[in-house]
């Protein structure tokens, strides 16, 4: 999808679409996947992220759970973005995304649809909604690192 | 009658023309904590500025002044709930009090004994009992709620038996705001020989509490939900029950003497439950909160909250897009959802209009099973709220479907 960050209606539509029709929404029991559970005492978000890493590439990413519009849409968008990317590329995206949320200069070319959260820090309490899945991704990749290290 | 303009002058949170970060301040999260009047804040200052010494420890006049202030605070709080001062133990808040109660009663429990709770309880009246049940083999039973979410004497009766040793219930539930018929429930509990524990966190600041009239055995509350400082609370217990309970914390001041043979003799209650230096300033501030509430009067407070709640319920119903879970509950708590809007999205949108409410499960994590919803929005009132606060709530809720506007306009 092509869009302009100067088109707020388009950005809003991306959030609503991903909230109402979350992508890659599936509970995975396959033991090859790394599953990370992200929940929070302060809000309702209760999200499972399932990551399949093969030879350094994230070949699949699914998720399921419950959350607000921001966390749901952000998780949906992330799962689409990181599929097929190397671990390093995914972490780069995460860094740029976090920079955007923290109000620092960022490379929008790496962020794709996730750019729709550019103003989420207008409500600082929503930053944790927008990055819950990215925090989960970091945990999953750390876990994967440990797992592949243990195998060696 | 409550004179809002006069009252708000007593609360520094309203001093900036009633604004917070350039938005009109509509604080409707009073079930979480309340604002503090100057009299409470000044009293805390008074301790640190004028009489800063430890309590119960010194032989000098300054220490004596602290003892008078600290024990004076205990006396005032005892009077406020119609207890004797030696039945009032200071805690850090309701959660600590409920833990002191649950673990303190541990020696009285054995496998197969029953502890009765309800599905509407806050974590602080659930989790300590889970632990104690695990340690003793006691069993947790739940009072079934009525269709609307109430605990009634009929329903309590249905779970009581000879095995019931403890009934522990919030006097006002923190999500739905139903007022329990505490006096009747206590007498039912006593009829099977059980102790009655009242979690008064949500009731203490909103209606008169008379422990003698209610005949509760133990009762806990926090200071900060009744205009007092954070970090101070009270565990009330009948003297003979406090004597039987073990303190969780050991340390300075709670013992009378001990020796190298590990023989310890404890102080009598309340000091037995007050190991270490207490929150002296907090206790003094809490006593001032008792003064303030008494001067406003609980009749006025209840009437005002009821009036505002009625307006809020009517306004939300008229909007047509709200589901209200407790339109008829007595306390000033309105728990609702806006159709098709997740609770946190709604609460964040309201916040952008200066309407501060809570979203989520409100620490009552068993309740959603009953309400059949993941999360709710909760607006909770106090006597310094006014009709403008309600209008702002209702108006913002009307447009809550536009919650993404905040990020794009």
Image (cartoon, grey):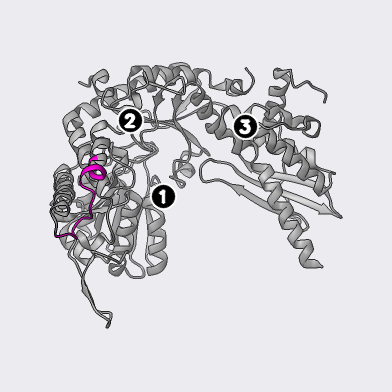
The secondary structure type at the circle numbered 3 is: helix
Main SS, magenta region, reads loop
Res. B126 in view? yes
- Identify the residue at image location x=58%, y=33%: A126
Q: Position of residue A144 (x, y in %)?
A: 75, 57
Examine the image and state in which quarter residue B166 appears: bottom left
Q: Residue furthest bottom?
A: B261
Name the quadrant containing residue A5: top right
Disc 2 element = loop
Q: Chain of mark 1?
A: B
Residue identifier under label 1: B123
Label annotation for residue A69 = 3
Q: Is residue B299 magenta?
A: no
Callout 2: 10 Å neighbours few (<14), some, many (20+)?
many
Label 1 – label 3 distance at C-alpha:
27 Å
N-terminal of the two: label 1 or label 2?
1
Check disc 2 and report the residue beneath it: B332
Residue visible at 30% across and 41% down in the picture: B229
Magenta stretch bounds: B46-59
- Asked whether B132 or B178 is in front, the reply is B132
| Residue B342 in view | no
């Amino acid at each position: 999808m092509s869009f302009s960050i100067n088109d707020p209606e388009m950005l809003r539509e991306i959030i609503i679409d991903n909230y109402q029709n979350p992508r890659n929404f599936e509970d995975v029991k396959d033991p090859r996947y790394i599953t990370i559970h992200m929940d929070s005492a302060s809000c309702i978000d209760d999200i499972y992220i399932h990551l399949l890493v093969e030879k350094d590439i994230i070949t699949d990413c699914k998720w399921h759970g419950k959350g607000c519009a921001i966390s749901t849409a952000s998780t949906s968008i992330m799962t689409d973005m990181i599929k097929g990317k190397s671990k390093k590329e995914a972490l780069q995206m995460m860094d740029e995304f976090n920079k955007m949320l923290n109000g620092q200069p960022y490379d929008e070319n790496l962020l794709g649809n996730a750019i729709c959260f550019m103003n989420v820090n207008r409500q600082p309490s929503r930053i944790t909604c927008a990055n819950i899945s990215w925090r989960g991704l970091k945990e999953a990749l750390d876990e994967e690192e440990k797992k592949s290290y243990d195998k060696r | 009658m409550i004179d809002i303009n006069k009252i708000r002058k007593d609360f520094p949170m309203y001093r900036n023309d009633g604004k917070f970060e350039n938005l009109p301040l509509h604080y409707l999260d009073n079930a979480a904590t309340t604002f503090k009047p100057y009299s409470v804040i000044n009293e805390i200052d008074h301790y640190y500025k004028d009489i800063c010494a430890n309590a119960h420890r010194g032989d000098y006049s300054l220490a004596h002044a602290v003892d008078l202030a600290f024990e004076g605070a205990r006396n005032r709080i005892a009077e406020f709930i119609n207890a004797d001062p030696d039945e009032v133990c200071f805690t850090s808040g309701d959660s600590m009090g409920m833990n002191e109660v649950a673990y303190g009663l541990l020696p009285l429990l054995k496998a197969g004994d029953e502890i009765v709770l309800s599905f509407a309880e806050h974590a602080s009246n659930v989790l300590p009992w889970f632990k104690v049940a695990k340690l003793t083999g006691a069993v947790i039973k739940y009072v079934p709620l009525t269709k609307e979410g109430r605990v009634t004497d009929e329903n309590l009766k249905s779970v009581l038996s000879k095995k019931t040793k403890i009934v522990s219930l919030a006097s006002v539930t923190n999500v739905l705001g139903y007022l329990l018929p505490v006096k009747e429930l206590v007498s039912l509990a006593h009829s099977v020989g059980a102790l009655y524990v009242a979690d008064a966190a949500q009731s203490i600041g909103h209606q008169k509490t008379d422990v003698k009239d209610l005949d509760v055995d133990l009762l806990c509350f926090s200071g900060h939900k009744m205009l007092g400082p954070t970090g101070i609370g009270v565990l009330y217990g009948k003297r003979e029950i406090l004597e039987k309970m073990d303190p969780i914390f050991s340390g300075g001041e709670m013992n009378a003497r001990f020796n190298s043979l590990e023989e310890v003799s404890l102080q009598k209650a309340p000091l037995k439950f007050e190991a270490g230096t207490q929150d002296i300033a907090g206790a003094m501030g809490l006593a001032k909160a008792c003064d303030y509430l008494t001067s406003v009067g609980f009749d006025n407070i209840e009437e005002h909250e009821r009036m505002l709640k009625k307006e809020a319920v009517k306004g939300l119903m008229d909007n047509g897009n709200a589901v209200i879970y407790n339109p008829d509950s007595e306390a000033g708590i309105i728990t609702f959802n806006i159709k098709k809007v997740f609770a946190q999205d709604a609460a964040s949108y309201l916040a952008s209009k200066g309407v501060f409410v809570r979203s989520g499960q409100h620490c009552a994590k068993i309740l959603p099973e009953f309400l059949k919803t993941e999360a709710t929005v909760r607006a909770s009132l106090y006597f310094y709220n006014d009709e403008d606060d309600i209008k702002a709530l209702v108006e913002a809720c009307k447009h809550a479907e536009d919650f993404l506007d905040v990020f794009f306009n």
